[in-house]
Every structure is written in C-alpha cells, then in structure tokens.
Image: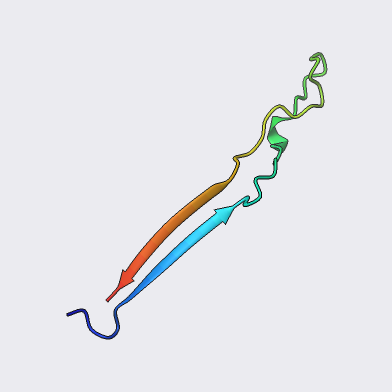
Amino acid sequence: MLGEGARLELRADVYNVFNNLNLNPNEISNNVGSSNFGTITGALAGRVMTIGARFNF
C-alpha cells in the first residue's frame, strides 16, 4: 500500500475575487492630438482562479 506518510494537498489561488475593474495604467492615451487624450483605454484581467493538487507518498 501507500503507507502512513501518504497525503493529498489541495490548493486554490483566487485573484480579484470580487471582480473589481482594474484599469491598466499602460493603456493611457498620451497622444495630445487625440480626442482620447488622458483616458485609459484598457483594463487588466478579471477574476482568475487556479486549482492544484499534490499527492505525496
């Protein structure tokens, strides 16, 4: 069998749990001649979740 030292580890990492809008500071329009000057035109990723498992024996 696997022995007494066998164990299973489960892990979940969640980022932006409440799904808040996070604006991307690298997407600020800096073209003075543009009508979008000074506005942020992009956002970062929404809710992200990773799940993992590890079995030690």
Left or right: where 43 falls relative to 12 = right
Examine the image and state in which quarter residue 53 appears. Answer: bottom left
Is 10 placed above or below 47 here?
below
| Quadrant in the picture for the N terminus | bottom left
Q: Which one is nearer the viewer's eye here, 9 or 39? A: 9
Residue at point 81%, 21% (across, down): 37
Q: Which one is nearer the viewer's eye here, 36 or 3? A: 3
Residue at point 63%, 39% (across, down): 44
Is 23 placed above or below 30 here?
below
Examine the image and state in which quarter residue 32 appears. Answer: top right
The percent coordinates of residue 14 (x first, y second) are 55, 55
The percent coordinates of residue 39 (x first, y second) are 79, 27
Left or right: where 36 falls relative to 5 = right
Residue at point 49%, 60% (across, down): 12
The percent coordinates of residue 43 (x first, y second) are 66, 35
Residue at point 31%, 69% (across, down): 55
Left or right: where 47 falls relative to 5 = right
The percent coordinates of residue 7 (x first, y second) are 33, 76
